[in-house]
Amino acid sequence: MAKLGFADFGHNLPEQVTQDAILNLIHYLNNNPKVHGVLVQLPLPPHIDSNVVTRAIRPRKDVDGFHPNNVGLMTLKRAQQQDDLLYRTSKFEYGIEPCTPKGCIELLDRYGVEINGANAVVLGRSNIVGHPLATLLLHRNATVTICHSKTKHIEKITRKADILIAAIGIARFVKRDWVKPGATVIDVGVNFAPDPITNKPRMCGDVDYAEVRKVAGAITPVPGGVGPMTVAMLMKNTLENAKRFWNKYYRPPWFMHV
Amino acid sequence: MAKLGFADFGHNLPEQVTQDAILNLIHYLNNNPKVHGVLVQLPLPPHIDSNVVTRAIRPRKDVDGFHPNNVGLMTLKRAQQQDDLLYRTSKFEYGIEPCTPKGCIELLDRYGVEINGANAVVLGRSNIVGHPLATLLLHRNATVTICHSKTKHIEKITRKADILIAAIGIARFVKRDWVKPGATVIDVGVNFAPDPITNKPRMCGDVDYAEVRKVAGAITPVPGGVGPMTVAMLMKNTLENAKRFWNKYYRPPWFMHV
């Protein structure tokens, strides 16, 4: 982060920390004008209510996009757009999109995958990846199907997908014959499972990469696919927050209105 | 509403009303402890920003469930449940579910339609019906597909639906051969189109009711299906708001803690 010119402060709290101590720290960061992004590393220990903690972060500093207000604005297609940075009224809504789903969309865009009109299938319905990603794909005019642990005949559904997102948390869940030839496969899973050859535990995704890559038109690896993109989007969200703050409070008198 | 024991006050404003006048009225209602539900009848004239107006309603009085905060809590599966009324801490989140989607779920439940594991197809992705209804069905373990104007071969998708929701706003859009025999069809559309027999304009839904009823296992008519259910859910949301308010401020000293 220092390379990008960001200053970052990690606050490592002991596991026995009280909820009030966390909330106090968040309030301090919320009110510190030098801080443009606050992020709580989940999961939290069981004696802490993570809903309360994520909600305590001021929505416009919530670079993870987990605050209900940001989730709502994103769902209603009212989250910030890049060019809205110049738009400066009190009415403006500062919705922030969550990093992993935003990163997946960015990946599709950068590699020229057509989302408009595509048949997208999302495996997994978590609040962090599956559900918001389905929403973002829907906003980009994909026909979206959300599958999960209760879905019957999941392979019949995935075989129709032009864009297949795997975020279900089971190692090598998506097999070769589940994927339509030429489909785009994005693997969001992070699992540790024994390697089929060496039998040593290894990081792997929700997709059987070695096999599925033979049929897929495009596929992201794990590690090295969605992960780095998530971090990049976190940086982007923070930068945009800082720019907005600057626009709002520190616009110098010589600044011409564009 | 008087029959149910609700007092209601309609504020009919002229079409030329300013946005500030509407906001002032909303602030008055927000701060009036006798009011437990505030609802702005949409659509608003073009000089009013409806996002600003719906956001001005205090989330816990927003019985329509259109405030971004309520949308977010609903999306995150953190909206209120009936039995949470007894749960009384400052941590508790007062998410309110939107009326029409809630009414559709209630209809399915009352008629014993199995949502768990069903293949649900939602036609339409509006912020008022399609999108939140897809979310509620997903939370009830349905496999949900959202179709819209950009979807290709929509009839192939609808033919696989166990539960088909039509909220796309085109009169008699869903034909007889689009529906799987025995499927449950919920028609949220309200359109005015000439009657095929008398040729006079008549209210009709998004489903060709006369034909589809011959194959569907269950179907809601228009008018008389989802509409009255929406009103009932609006009353339910208001009642729950009032109960919560009473629980919070007016719990009498002799009230035993349950």
Image: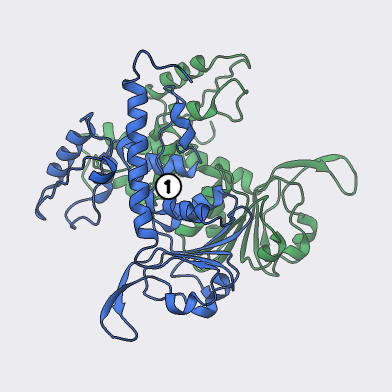
Chain colours: A blue, B green
- Amino acid carrying label 1: it is Met
Rendering coords of residue B11 (x, y %): 55, 20
Q: Tell which of B61 and A160 is nearer to you.
A: A160
Q: Is residue A208 visible?
A: no
Rendering coords of residue A245 (x, y %): 33, 28
Report the residue at 64% width, 68% height from top.
B160
Q: Is residue B201 visible?
A: yes
Crowd around label 1: few <14 · some 14–19 · many ≥20 (10 Å): many
Label 1: which secondary element: helix
Instruction: Say above or below: A30 vs B179.
Output: above
The residue tagged 1 is B74
User: In terms of image quadrants, where is residue B256?
Assistant: top left
Q: Tell which of B231 and A100 is nearer to you.
A: A100
Instruction: Say above or below: A211 vs B174.
Output: below
Q: Is residue A65 left or right of residue B123?
A: left
Instruction: Say above or below: B219 vs A244.
Output: below
Q: Is residue A147 left or right of residue B175?
A: left
Report the residue at 33% width, 86% height from top.
A197
Instruction: Say above or below: B104 vs A95.
Output: below
Q: Tell which of A107 and A14 is nearer to you.
A: A107
Rendering coords of residue B33 (x, y %): 36, 24
Q: Tell which of A57 and B100 is nearer to you.
A: A57
